[in-house]
Image (cartoon, rainbow, N blue to C red):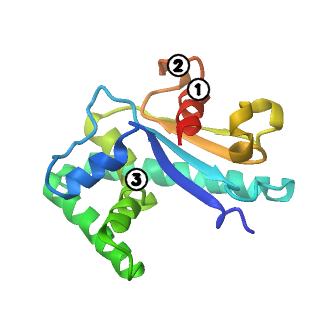
Amino acid sequence: MPVVADSYMGIFMPADISGRITKFLAGEATFPFIEKSEIIGAFFIFGKDYGVPESEVKEAKDLARRTVEQAAKDARMYASMPGRLDPAFTRENYTKRMLQIAVDTKGVGQDEINKRVAGDPAILSDCFAQHVAHHRHDYYFEIFGPFRRDQVPFQLRKKLEGRMLLLGYSVRNAKALPFASSLEPFFAWLSKV
């Protein structure tokens, strides 16, 4: 399976991002729903189900590069057009995406639609770019892998061995994180899901 089709994106910091998006869409929270003092952490797993064979490492790195370029482009766009950070505008865009997901997933209940919306890569990518732009944060991305068996904790081997991982944070660099390494909070989060 091509690495592009076997990839997955999410946000792991803050851990309750799905609930915040759901509350925002329901009008129970306003924008920004991520505070300035909070670090946002995004992840992209390449080869989620099948791993990244050596023959596709270059393709995965290229996909990671394009992902970073798109995040930078989106953050610049939001920073240069503050009207796009307006709560009503943001809620309208998220609602449009929710309607598209509802149409694409006919026959599923509202709870399942809400779950898919709160985990939708388009919405999550927007969350990252909006947070960075709204709070004028620096950000950086770091790519890892394909992970060897000895590079991941035992309990995460089935999820990460042979995979590639792109991590993005709303800080200048890894030294600005309050963790021993940029992998530490991701590994902790992944161990719980």
Three-letter amino acid code of the residue under disc 1:
Glu
Q: Are marks 2 and 1 in contact (CB under 8 Å)?
A: yes
Horizontal side of 41 relative to 89 (left or right) equals right
Q: Position of residue 154 (x, y in %)?
A: 74, 32
- Judging by the rendered image, the residue that carries numbered circle 2 is 179
Q: Is residue 113 visible?
A: yes
Of residues 49 and 183, the one nearer the viewer is 49
Circle 3 — which element? helix
- Judging by the rendered image, the residue that carries numbered circle 3 is 124
Tell me if residue 97 comes above or below residue 86 in the rendering. Answer: below
Residue shown at the point (43%, 52%) measured from the top left: 73
Q: Which mark is residue 92?
A: none
Circle 2 — which element? loop
Residue shown at the point (45%, 45%) measured from the top left: 11
Q: Is residue 81 visible?
A: no
Circle 1 — which element? helix
Closer to the chain start, of discs 1 and 3, is 3
Closer to the chain start, of discs 2 and 1, is 2
Three-letter amino acid code of the residue under disc 2:
Phe
Closer to the chain start, of discs 3 and 2, is 3
Residue shown at the point (29%, 74%) measured from the top left: 99
- Judging by the rendered image, the residue that carries numbered circle 1 is 184
Of residues 162 and 64, the one nearer the viewer is 162
Horizontal side of 158 relative to 131 (left or right) equals right
